[in-house]
Image (spheres, rainbow, N blue to C red):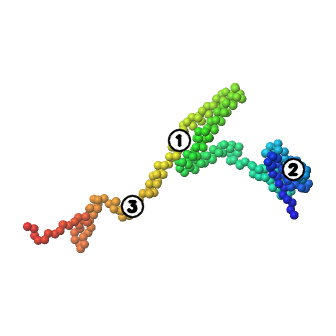
Amino acid sequence: MPAPPITITAEFSGSVVARGATDDLSASLLRHAGFLQINDWYGRRHRLSTTMPINDQAAIASHAAEMLRAARYTVDLSPALDTTRLSPPVHPLGPYVAGAELLQITDRIRAAENGADLQRAVDHLLHPEHGALERVREALEAAGEHINALDEEAYALADRFTFASEFVSSAQSELTGSETELRRVGEVQQAQAGTRQHSPVPTTHQGAALAMSPAATKAKVTPAAGGQEPHSSAAVRPPSASGPRR
């Protein structure tokens, strides 16, 4: 019969407890990973201190589970302690997470299919409180202030950062109120395209009739039957008078 799994869970008290390590090998592996062994009337178990930082607890628990599984033990590890699940996503620009997020905004701007989509994408840059430009302005301003706090003699460098933050503020002012205009981008072209799609197309006979001017229609001549002289299709012959005119 296979041995029951070894469970490693996070308790409400804040400690991490491993249960099910009943033989010496599994107990030795848990102690080697950093667990403290406890033997009391509950039996043998292993735990981590409640004062240990959560990240350290997860690292030790994941390492212990790895070693136990390599030794052919079945281990149930709480997802909250599994560092393979807690690993942050890999960003395309490495540590420059903010730059990677701005690249995503740029992609959304380029993929916008209409003015409304464009305005929603650009709003991540221009929002007066949470937009990227406001965050950049604040960061530059804070950098200038902190340079002065760290070194009063570096006032020239601090001023450069302050001036840069003011340039960003000027850019924000230049684009204030552009939301409505952005939403209207492409409306005229879309309306014209819709009109062209719904305009009636004349049939062949209607087109031929419209192409012929009234003068051309009136002057159209058709040959008379039986070799008689031609006559105008638009002209009407007067009725022949009976008998000589007096």
- The residue lying at 79 percent from left, 45 percent from top is 54
The residue carrying mark 1 is 178
> Is residue 50 depicted above or below 169 in this figure?
below
Which quarter of the figure has residue 68? bottom right
For marks 1 and 2, give the CA distance: 62 Å
The three-letter code of the residue at mark 3 reads Pro
Q: Which mark is residue 202?
A: 3
Determine the secondary structure under disc 2: strand
Q: Which mark is residue 46?
A: 2
Nearest the camera: 55 or 230?
55
Q: Earlier in the sequence, mark 3 or mark 2?
A: 2
- The residue lying at 33 percent from left, 62 percent from top is 209
Q: In the rendering, at what x and y percent does residue 181 appear?
A: 51, 43
The three-letter code of the residue at mark 2 reads His
| Residue at far bottom of view | 226
Determine the secondary structure under disc 3: loop
Q: Is residue 33 left or right of residue 201?
A: right
Q: Earlier in the sequence, mark 3 or mark 1?
A: 1
Mark 1 vs 2: CB contact within 8 A: no
For marks 3 and 2, give the CA distance: 88 Å
